[in-house]
Image (tube, grey):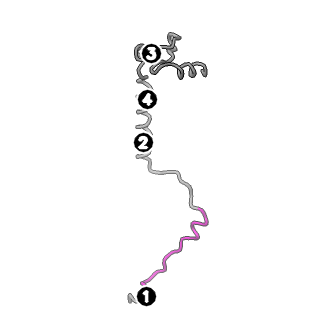
Amino acid sequence: GSIVVEKVKEAAEGVGYNVLSNVYENMIEAGIIDPAKVTRSAVQNAASIAAMVLTTEAVVTESPKEDDLKAMAGMGGGMPPGMM
């Protein structure tokens, strides 16, 4: 693994390791452009997760800390002075 990575780093631009033929060659000339299945799967998974987040009716969050609850003072009932 690491030997292949080092050889590819040192090679000219566009050269990579073809696993099927066990040769270092220009990937575009060999017809190896982009694994379309990988790209398509990544987009499908991202869309699926986004749809799940948008349609979820509940979200898991942290509960408020006790200190935070004590800091929030409630307003008293009734009208402010001078409003009567």
Q: Nearer the viewer, residue 5 or 63?
A: 5
For mark 3, what is the residue? 26
For mark 1, what is the residue? 81
Q: Nearer the viewer, residue 37 or 18?
A: 18
Q: Spatial distance from mark 2 to mark 3, Cα to Cα?
A: 37 Å
Kindly identify which numbered label has been placed on residue 10.
Answer: none
Tell me if mark 1 has few (under 14), some (14-19) or many (20+) residues whose alpha carbon lies within 10 angstroms of its own. Answer: few
Q: Spatial distance from mark 1 to mark 2, Cα to Cα?
A: 51 Å
Q: Which residues are magenta?
A: 65-81
Q: Secondary structure at mark 1?
A: loop
Residue drawn 42% across and 23% down? 34
Name the mark nearer the viewer: 4 or 3: 3
- x, y (%) of residue 61? 53, 53
Name which quarter of the figure residue 72 lies in.
bottom right
For mark 2, what is the residue? 50
- Reply yes or no: does residue 26 show up in magenta: no
CB under 8 Å between discs 2 and 3: no
Q: In the rendered view, does 38 fall on the left or right side of 4?
A: left
For mark 4, what is the residue? 41
